[in-house]
Image (cartoon, rainbow, N blue to C red):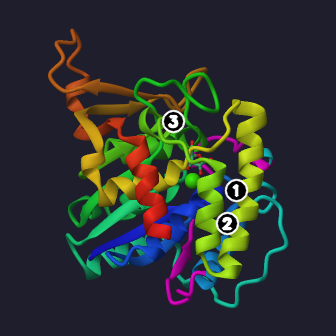
């Protein structure tokens, strides 16, 4: 089995990804860490605890993390995409469990000390928790098995500005630290998540296959998210961005990756833009090759990814 810590801001597509990691018997969820992003962090924590309970896995620890970016004024949370509650505005029960006593960054540090070299970090929100863990304990780079992030874009432009993807835009300074830290990292960004579309029919089948409570929450949240895609993106279906990061963990063969160097624009008109320099390019400046090598997903078999999502949640 693959032990993971899932860093998340649930969030409709986060919620689907959480259902996925709970459903896959080959994934061991060591814990979830929460961040602001789609919602404020208290709501993210509420939703993570609730989804774990609805999925029958209340033992999964949830450690709360960042409620603010490292160094910018936060934008209002995108209630028009994920709802005020992050799950499409529906009546939600209160989870009975409590968050872990530790901050998310400390949780990441402690768990990777307990199991050096074993844990994959799958991060699908703004990257403040990982950046904080790096600041508190730089040696964590040597203790993770790998880091998979959903965020950024190498060649597809942005989804919140012409150049910036939401998770990176929400905390560009944190993203820059995480993407250049020198740990084994793969970026699963808009280059592949926009090529992966899940239809309303599929989502209805997925919701129907869950237990009644989890199915209802997924179905209502998806309807809200699908309205946003229909009205604002002009798409009959949604991109399961965060589930793509889980798909990469389980089925990297469905993706094509390119090795190279990443950096992030942290200030100004381009803030939140990820810049990708494929390795070995004869750039005049050698500035790029000084950043550590990472992998960026540039291609995907989107149909196979959504097939896998549906099969795993069946
Ligand atoms: C990312 O931003 C969030 O809105 C989604 O949950 C996903 O993690 C997509 O840009
Ligand atoms: Ca997310």
Q: Residue at x 43, y 32 (%)?
A: 191
Contact between labelled residues 1 and 2, with CB atoms less than 8 Å apart = yes
Q: Which residues are magenta?
A: 55-79
**Mark positioned earlier in the residue sequence (2 or 3):** 3
* Mark 2 and mark 1: Cα distance apart in space: 6 Å
Magenta: main secondary structure equals: loop
Contact between labelled residues 3 and 1, with CB atoms less than 8 Å apart = no
Which residue in the structure is indicated by mark 3?
A: 194
Query: Does the magenta-highlighted stretch encompass residue 58?
Result: yes
Determine crowd level at label 1: few under 14, some 14-19, many 20+ residues with C-alpha closer than 10 A: many
Which residue in the structure is indicated by mark 2?
A: 218
Q: Residue at x 43, y 67 (%)?
A: 312
Query: Does the magenta-highlighted stretch encompass residue 227?
Result: no
**Residue 134: mark:** none
Determine crowd level at label 2: few under 14, some 14-19, many 20+ residues with C-alpha closer than 10 A: many
Which image quarter holds the N terminus?
Answer: bottom left
* Mark 1 and mark 3: Cα distance apart in space: 17 Å
In what element is the residue under mark 2?
helix
**Residue 222: mark:** 1
Q: Position of residue 95 (x, y in %)?
A: 71, 85
Answer with left or right where residue 198 lies relative to residue 254.
right
């Amino acid at each position: 089995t693959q032990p993971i810590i899932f860093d998340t801001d649930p969030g409709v597509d986060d919620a689907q990804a959480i259902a996925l990691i709970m459903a896959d018997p080959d994934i061991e969820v060591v814990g979830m860490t929460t961040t602001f992003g789609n919602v404020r962090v208290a709501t993210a924590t509420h939703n993570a605890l609730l989804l774990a309970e609805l999925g029958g896995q209340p033992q999964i620890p949830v450690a709360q993390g960042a409620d603010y970016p490292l160094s910018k004024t936060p934008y209002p949370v995108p209630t028009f995409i994920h709802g005020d509650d992050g799950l499409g505005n529906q009546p939600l029960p209160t989870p009975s469990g409590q968050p872990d006593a530790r901050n998310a960054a400390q949780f990441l540090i402690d768990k990777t000390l307990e199991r050096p070299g074993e844990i994959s970090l799958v991060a699908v929100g703004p990257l403040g928790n990982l950046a904080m863990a790096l600041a508190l304990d730089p040696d964590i780079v040597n203790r993770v098995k790998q880091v998979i992030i959903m965020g950024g874009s190498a060649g597809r432009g942005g989804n919140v500005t012409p150049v910036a993807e939401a998770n990176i835009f929400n905390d560009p300074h944190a993203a820059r630290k995480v993407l250049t830290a020198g740990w084994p990292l793969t970026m699963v960004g808009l280059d592949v998540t926009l090529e992966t579309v899940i239809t309303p029919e599929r989502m209805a089948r997925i919701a129907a296959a869950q237990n009644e409570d989890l199915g209802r929450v997924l179905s209502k949240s998806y309807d809200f998210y699908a309205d946003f895609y229909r009205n604002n993106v002009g798409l009959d279906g949604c991109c399961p961005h965060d589930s793509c990061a889980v798909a990469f963990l389980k089925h990297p063969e469905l993706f094509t990756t390119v090795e190279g160097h990443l950096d992030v624009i942290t200030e100004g008109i381009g803030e939140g833009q990820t810049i990708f320099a494929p390795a070995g390019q004869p750039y005049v400046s050698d500035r790029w090759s000084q950043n550590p090598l990472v992998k960026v997903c540039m291609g995907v078999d989107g149909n196979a990814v959504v097939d896998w999502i549906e099969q795993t949640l069946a």
